[in-house]
Amino acid sequence: MSALQRKGWIRWSVFLLLLLPLILLIQRLLNGDLGADPAKFIVKELGYWSLCWLWLTLSVTPARIYLGWRWLTSYRRMFGLFAFFYAVLHLLAFATFLLGWRWDSLITELTKRPYIIVGSLALLCMLPLAITSTKGMQRKLGKDWKRLHSLIYPISILVMLHYTLQIRSDFSQQLIFAVLLVVLLGCRIYRKRRP
Amino acid sequence: KLASAVHNPGYSTEEKLAPYYDAITHNNFYEFGTDKRDPVRHAQGLITDPWQVEISGAVAKPGQYHLEDILAPHALEDRIYRLRCVEAWSMVIPWLGFPLADLIKRFEPTSKAKYVHFTTLEDKEQMPGQSNLFGTITWPYVEGLRIDEAMNPLALLVVGMYGNALPPQNGAPLRLVVPWKYGFKSIKSIVRIHFSETMPQTSWNHIAPDEYGFYANVNPAVDHPRWSQATERRLPSSLFSPNIIDTLPFNGYAEEVADLYKGMDLKQWF
């Protein structure tokens, strides 16, 4: 196996790994193993994995700098696109399975509930990043590309807020993701402020 | 075990029952974890026999009673009720129980008994959810009713469902079912029934008073701040026919209970 082939093989494995939560979800769905309220379960699960892949995207740079994992950088686009992909499915599942595409409910939910507004805003901001994620766009935009893609920082904060605003009686999950986010953003701030 | 119960046709519905499996695996019982499947996983070791219930406060006959003595004089009835969760899902469930009013009368509340408090067991050994460091509920779980609500014939003390004894995750050995209110009012695994002149500080109301009122009557016109209460998902629901139905005022029991709230602004007293 040539080095190039090996790289292609690894790339496909990573791709499948990121897809795995969706595959398992579909498998459970087909087995009727999502419980009495599959709608709610699917929406939560898709949101959760979008969040995980977004945090993974954010960890690429710190992993390169602090762990020397330069190879990870070539997967960043895939991570980010998967975060976007799961977020889109999350919204579609919410509109389809929880609201049944009732337009009146959809408009109410999208305008009245702070956590949904915040979440939608995050998804909206991810859209231009997904569109400009290609190599061609990266070349075309040059320096602006990096500026545009630093949108991931406010996006991550919006996503964290979206998650936090849904706490009801247990905030253990939110705490874990918030601590991770503080580390991931904190090490960037720390580096920037160092002379 | 509880086959001696008599079906009460006055309290029934033509709606399709939730399958037993769904009713015992999709539960909110945060003492055993916050996920819907946590209670069925973690509640099976709950010791429900022996069980004691304390009757206290403004009653002529307070005391610590064995469950057997609490239940002895009451004939069990079979009633089918809709259960509407505050999270906008619902199930139709056949319960076995007896009117709360019958129990209350036995212990002879005094004129000072304006409210009834109910308390769930607190036992960190048996209830792992009570040790959650990142939870916001202060244990034990407390719920309550105004005395006239508690005396309404719909309010049921329940010991079984689907013809069997209650499984632990559904609130064994003794729970309340108040079908015109959101499910969190229907407190599980009761160890104390207390009568007082003042309104109890109930658990969810304590955590988020703007989201969970003391009354918590099912009301499609008053949204939870984070979601609409106008519709509900009748469970079990399949994905491609999502079973989203309109929520009825007082969960469809307005005829029986609306009088209790005459003259009250239900938007204020949600």
Image: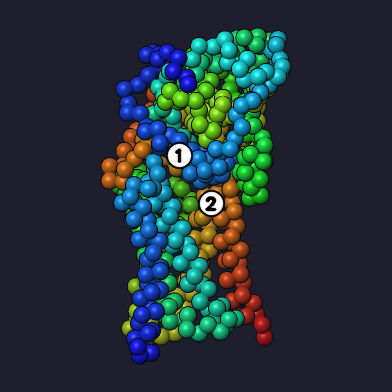
Mark 1, mark 2: which one is toward the viewer? 1
Number of disc labels:
2
SS type, badge 2: loop
- Marks 1 and 2 share the same chain: no
> Residue B173 in the image: x percent, y percent?
56, 26
The label shown at residue B25 is 1
Residue B161 versus residue A72: which sits nearer the camera? B161
Residue B190 to residue B195: above or below: below
Residue B42 versus residue B250: which sits nearer the camera? B42
Residue B5 versus residue B261: which sits nearer the camera? B5
Visual colour scheme? rainbow
Most extreme residue toward the left is B240
Work out which quarter of the rendered image holds the C terminus of chain A and state it. bottom right
Separation (CA) of disc 1 from disc 2:
27 Å
Q: Dot 2, crowdedness within 10 Å: few (<14), some or many (≥20)?
A: some
Residue to which mark 2 is pinned: A165
* Chain label for disc 1: B
> Residue B231 in the image: x percent, y percent?
37, 36
SS type, badge 1: helix
Q: Residue at x 43, y 55 (%)?
A: A45
Q: In which quarter of the image is residue A120?
A: bottom left
Please say whether residue B202 is visible from this viewpoint: no
Residue A5 to residue B96: above or below: below
Work out which quarter of the rendered image holds the N terminus of chain A and state it. bottom left
Q: In the shown orientation, is residue A6 left or right of residue B195? A: left
Q: In the shown orientation, is residue B30 left or right of residue A52? A: right
* Chain label for disc 2: A
The three-letter code of the residue at mark 1 reads Thr
The three-letter code of the residue at mark 2 reads Leu
> Residue B66 in the image: x percent, y percent?
65, 19
Residue A162 to residue A19: above or below: above
